[in-house]
Amino acid sequence: MFASRTVFVTTNTVQKTAPNAPGTYRHRWVALFVILAVEVMDLLDSLVTNIAGPSIRTELGGSYSLIQWLGAAYTLAMAIGLLTGGRLGDIYGRRRMFLIGAIGFTLASLACGLAQTPTQLIVGRAVQGLFGAVMLPQGLGMIKQLFTPAEQAKAFGAFGPVMGLSSVGGPILAGWLVDADYFGSGWRMIFFINLPLGLFAVLGAIRFLPEFKSEKAPRLDGLGVVLAAVGAFLLLYPLVQGRELDWPVWCFVMLAAGVVIFGLFAMFEARRERNHLDPLVTPSLFRKRAFSGGLALGLVFFGALIGTGLVMTFYLQIGLGYSPLKAGLTTLPQALGTVVGFIAAGAGLTERLGRKLLLLGTVVMTVGVAAFALTVQLAGPDITPWHMIPSMLLVGAGMGLAMAPFFNIVLAGVDNEETGSASGALTSVQQLGGAFGIAVLGTIFFALLPSQVASHVDDSSAELRSVLTTAGVPSDTQPAVISGIRDCLRDRAAADDPDVVPASCQGSGSNPEIAAYAQEQVRAGFQATTIRTTGVTVLLLMLAFGLAFLLPKEARPEDEVAH
């Protein structure tokens, strides 16, 4: 699933330690390629684990929640880190923090590729996200300082094709690397491929990036970062793990504690503002309808976007049994549709339509998701990637049309001096929404799956009797056998660890007719669960459509937006 990686940094009065004025630094275009290299690393790492997730879980073991955590740990860490990543560059120097971020991200990629347990890999993904949040704002900030205003349009314009190609090629690359199994590395190659990119970025930064620092560096809000991180984790952890643990009381205690922590965070930020200190998020922003509405819209929209990508992975690879490469190719029309949507928005639609373009994109994406569910329903077990192309194109086009104007429209509702704080908060919410989308929609999917599998066994009892008769099972014992098969398939679908055989399946035979029937019912259960979970996505997108009316009607002109 393609995810936008729009990152804004504040525009401060800066003094470059190098003597060159903007537009005169002779290596500035080479520096741009160095900056683009880390953008590619980040975007690829936000895409590849969805495709490789099932293969990773098969090798390392553990429950299906591992696939959720592979995405959620990265985006949650990125969301928290982005709150202060740009300010670290203002304080300690953008080149220095770029190098620290690139080195840390590359080493974390190596650690992910060498991970031997699910916990090691999840921790590695979180470390990747944190260093990515340190690395990305520095490069974008340096573009503002290296290039003249006339050149900046060309420099930022280079991001579109690079990000577009990465979004199109990322899932295919991930599937190809997993299937190719180079040097017996399997899924690990999706992380090892970052090593040459990271080495290029580090060596290029040492050679070609000049240093910048702010004349008046802001103070870090360390306690604010801790409160935001703790609050987000307290909300996210029970959402991912609660279903597997059968929702113990402490899960709900954690959720309540997360809400309390965010309340304390708001009070602490207001206190810092009263004391004339630099808050992570300017509290006055929350009194503006456009900003508050934009935060809510971002959480809902990006949650639906990223969470639906995970659901499609479950359906394609686990339900239909597609290989990683085939799954990546199946989602290619969606990535292409997203690129088309961005191109259309950049061709003048944003300026002409403003908020209407965001509304239009949300409608198109909603229609695409509904069409995907309808396709799954109508095609049934005979579905092929070709069946899914029209709906995937619609989903991608809607995503591109809606995401392109989102930030500028929200920022049109805040004052100029609040743009930096608002931009950082919106970018963090974009990542946070993705983490919660993965948690919520993934949890809903696996909560529905057992009952859907059992329901299909009940609905096909006549077919099962015929299968049992063909297999030579006496008619008087068939009711007990049918009940045992139903319980076995339901318990397998509900199992935390799919590699562990449930007690209800112990001693089950290996008759090929019965095995084929069981596989058909599991596939039907995945189909029904996918349809119902995408129904939740449709509801989320309808909510996003309503929240969009809280935003200003027109986008802020490009020359007033802090990149």
Image: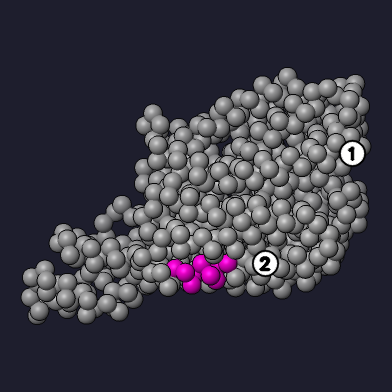
Colour mapping: one colour
Tag 1 secondary structure:
helix
Q: How many other residues sit within 10 Å of disc 2, few (<14), some (14-19) or many (≥20)?
A: many
Q: Residue at x 70, y 71 (%)?
A: 545
In front of the other: 178 or 14 = 178
What amino acid does circle 1 point to?
Answer: Pro
* Quadrant assignment, res 500: bottom left
Q: Which mark is residue 362?
A: 2
Q: CA distance from mark 1 to mark 2?
A: 33 Å
* First in residue order: circle 1 vs circle 2: 1
Q: Which mark is residue 436?
A: none
Q: Is residue 41 on the magenta stretch?
A: no
In front of the other: 327 or 104 = 327
Q: How many other residues sit within 10 Å of disc 1, few (<14), some (14-19) or many (≥20)?
A: some
Q: Residue at x 72, y 21 (%)?
A: 206
Q: Quadrant of the C terminus?
A: top right
Magenta highlight range: 368-376
Q: Is residue 115 left or right of residue 31?
A: left
Q: Is residue 508 left or right of residue 40?
A: left
**What is the x, y in percent for residue 70?**
51, 47
In front of the other: 183 or 109 = 183
Pointer 1 residue: 149
Placement of 135 over or under 3, stated as above or below: above
* Quadrant assignment, res 548: bottom right
Q: Residue at x 56, y 67 (%)?
A: 369
